[in-house]
Image (spheres, rainbow, N blue to C red):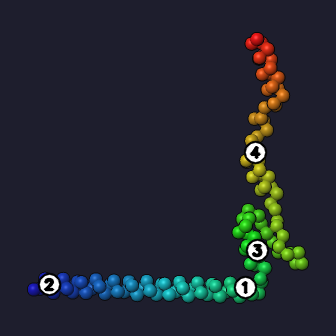
Amino acid sequence: MLEDKQVAEERIVVEQNILEQEKIKKEQVIIQAEAEAKQMEIKGEALKQYPEIIQLEFIQKLSPNIAWGILTGEGIVPFLDLLKLQEDFESTVPATGNVQNTENLDQNTSEENNTAE
């Protein structure tokens, strides 16, 4: 009988802890939702004040590797990083030192064919 009472009290303590944890999770969800709502409110106000931001975000999603800027009277203009473009291009194209001259290759092949005959 004493053991049953002790087990019941332990269960109550465990259930109270679980309830407390659920309350904390609920508060965290509410705080997170309030933060997201505030973030959307701030962004909405910024978009009302600067509608060009929508265009800029749209363009950035279309081409994430190009830097864009807004110039007064000019609208949105791309800023190309020519050095980065050159580096990217050079990293994808094989080095020219490894490419054989096709004329020499053809000439060597025809000389080998003549020698074999």
Q: Quadrant of residue 13?
A: bottom left
Amino acid, disc 4: Val
Q: Spatial distance from mark 2 to mark 4, Cα to Cα? A: 79 Å
Question: Mark 1 — residue?
Answer: 46
Question: Mark 3 — residue?
Answer: 56
Residue at coordinates 87% horizontally, 78% vertically from top-left? 72
Amino acid, disc 2: Asp
Q: Spatial distance from mark 1 to mark 4, Cα to Cα? A: 43 Å
Of labels 1 and 4, earlier in sequence is 1
Q: Nearer the viewer, mark 2 or mark 1?
A: 1
Residue at coordinates 24% horizontally, 84% vertically from top-left? 11
Q: Spatial distance from mark 4 to mark 3, Cα to Cα? A: 32 Å
| Mark seen at residue 93 | 4
Q: Residues within 10 Å of mark 3 (few under 14, many from 20)?
A: some
Query: Which percent across, then down, holds residue 104?
Result: 82, 26
Query: Which percent across, then down, holds residue 46?
Result: 72, 85
| Towards the viewer: 55 or 18 | 55
Question: Mark 2 — residue?
Answer: 4
Q: Residues within 10 Å of mark 4 (few under 14, many from 20)?
A: few
Q: Spatial distance from mark 2 to mark 3, Cα to Cα? A: 68 Å
Left/right placement of residue 42 relative to residue 108 reads left
Under circle 1, the secondary element is helix
Of labels 2 and 3, earlier in sequence is 2
Above or below, comparing residue 108 to residue 86 in the picture: above
Q: Spatial distance from mark 2 to mark 1, Cα to Cα? A: 63 Å
In the current view of this chain or complex, which residue is farthest to the right?
73
